[in-house]
Amino acid sequence: MIISPAKRASKVEEYYFSRNNKRLDAMRRNGVDVINLGIGSPDLPPAVNVINTLAASAAQDDVHGYQSYVGIPQLRQGYAEWYKKWYGVSLDPNTEILPLIGSKEGIMHIMMAFINEGDGVLIPDPGYPTYSSVANLVGAKVVKYNLYEHLGWQPDFDELERLDLTGIKIMWTNYSNMPTGARATRELYEKIVDFGRRHNIMICNDNPYSFILNNNPLSILGVEGAKDVCIELNSMSKAHNMAGWRFGMAASNAETIATVLRIKSNMDSGVFRPMQLAAVEALKLDKEWFDNLNAEYAQRQKYAFEIMDTLGCKYDKNQGGLFVWAKVDDKWQSAEQQSDDILNKTGVFITPGFIFGRQGERFLRISLCAKIPVFVEALRRIKNM
C-alpha cells in the first residue's frame, strides 16, 4: 500500500542545493572534475581550543545524557557576553536567549509559534529560500517585498507602506544580507523597527553574516525598544567555522522566547553537552580570530572578483558576507543560462540568483568557501573556456 503524502509536502520542493548536489555528483561519476563554488559551508576548522574542549569533555563519563531544552547556563551566559561585547546589546541569559540547533531550525520554530494558516509573512526578494518554504509549510500567505540594487539592496519603505498589510504578522529581514552582501546600518535597522512597531508586525532578523568581511557587526536589537517587536537569529556556523556543529540562537523579549520554547521543547532533546562547552569557548574568541578569518576571506574575494570580471559581470566591491554577488552581462538571457554554460564548459558551478527570487534572476553568486588553489583553478578554467 502506498500512503499519500501530507498536503504540506506538495507546497515545497527539495532544497535547490540538495537537488543540485545530485547533478554535480552525476557529473563526477561521469569523470568531470567539478569545482563547486555554490553553497556557503565554511571549509576552515574551528579554533584549536574549541576542538580540544570538545575532545576532553567527550572523554568524561557523565556528559552523555539528555540535556536541557534551553542549553546549559554557561552557553546562554556566553551568548549574552558575546552580544554585549560585539553588538553592545544587553540580554538576560535566563529569559531572553534560546540556544538552537542552528539558526535554520529557528525559522521553523518561530513560524510554528506565531503563524496560523492564512496569516501573512513578508519575505525579502532576493532572500534566503527557507523563509518561503517554511512559510508555505505552515500554511502562511507569502507576501514578497523587493530589495533593490539601486537602493543598496534595501527595501523601498514607501513601497512597503503601499502594500496591503492586512493580516501580516511577521517580516523576515536578513543583514548582513544573503545573497547580496549588503551590510546593515543603524539607520536601516531603525527604519525596520519603526515599520514593525507601527504596523504591529514581528520583525525576524536573521543575522549570521555580520562578522564576515565586516568590521562593524550590528544587531537589530541595538535599536532602542527593538526587543519589544523583534526577534533575532544568530549562528556560529559562519564566523566560528562551526556549520556542521549546528549552533545558533534566538534573542528577544522573555515572552517571545518562552513562546518559541513551547515549540522547540517538543522537537528535540538538547545538544550534546561537550559540544555546548566547546561552543562556550568559541564565543570567547577575540578580535584576532575574526581579523585572521577575514584576511583569508578577503584574499578569496579578490579571486571571486576576478572570476566575475572574466565573465563580464558587474558588482559592488564593498559587499561583505560569505559570497560575491554580481550582475550578468546583457548578452545573457538569464544568470541561469550563464551558470549552465560555465558548468558545461568548465565543470565550475556558480549559483544562479533566480533561486533567491525574481530580483536575483540576472545575478550570479560565488561562495568564498573554497581554498585559494581551488579559486586559482576555477579562474584558469573560466579564462580558457
Image: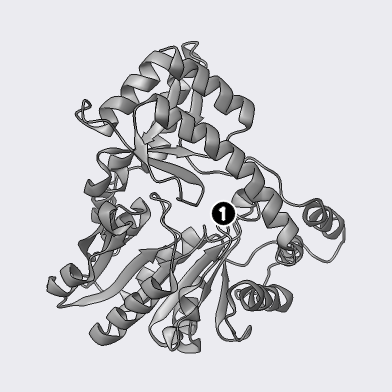
Q: Is residue 288 visible?
A: yes
Q: Is residue 48 above or below residue 265?
A: above
Residue hosting label 1: 212
Choose between 14 and 79: the one closer to the eye. 79
Tell me the SS state at disc 1. Answer: loop
The image position of residue 133, as x and y in percent, is 31, 54
Question: Residue 338 appears in which quarter of the rendering?
Answer: top left
The image position of residue 61, as x and y in percent, is 86, 62
The image position of residue 323, as x and y in percent, is 47, 44
Residue at 38% across, 83% down? 229
Choose between 101 and 179: the one closer to the eye. 179
Question: Residue 175 appears in which quarter of the rendering?
Answer: bottom left
- 172 horizontally vs 269: left or right: left
Q: Is residue 1 visible?
A: no
- 261 horizontally vs 125: left or right: right
Quadrant assignment for the C terminus: top left
Residue at 82% across, 58% down? 53
- Number of labels in the image equals 1
| Amino acid type, callout 1 | Ile
Residue at 55% across, 83% down? 96
Residue at 31% across, 82% down? 194
Quadrant assignment for the N terminus: top left
The image position of residue 184, as x and y in percent, is 44, 65
Assess disc 1: are there few (<14), some (14-19) or many (≥20) residues with their C-alpha within 10 Å of its C-alpha: many
- 225 horizontally vs 210: left or right: left
Task: Give the colour scheme shown.
Answer: one colour
Q: Is residue 21 above or below residue 259?
A: above
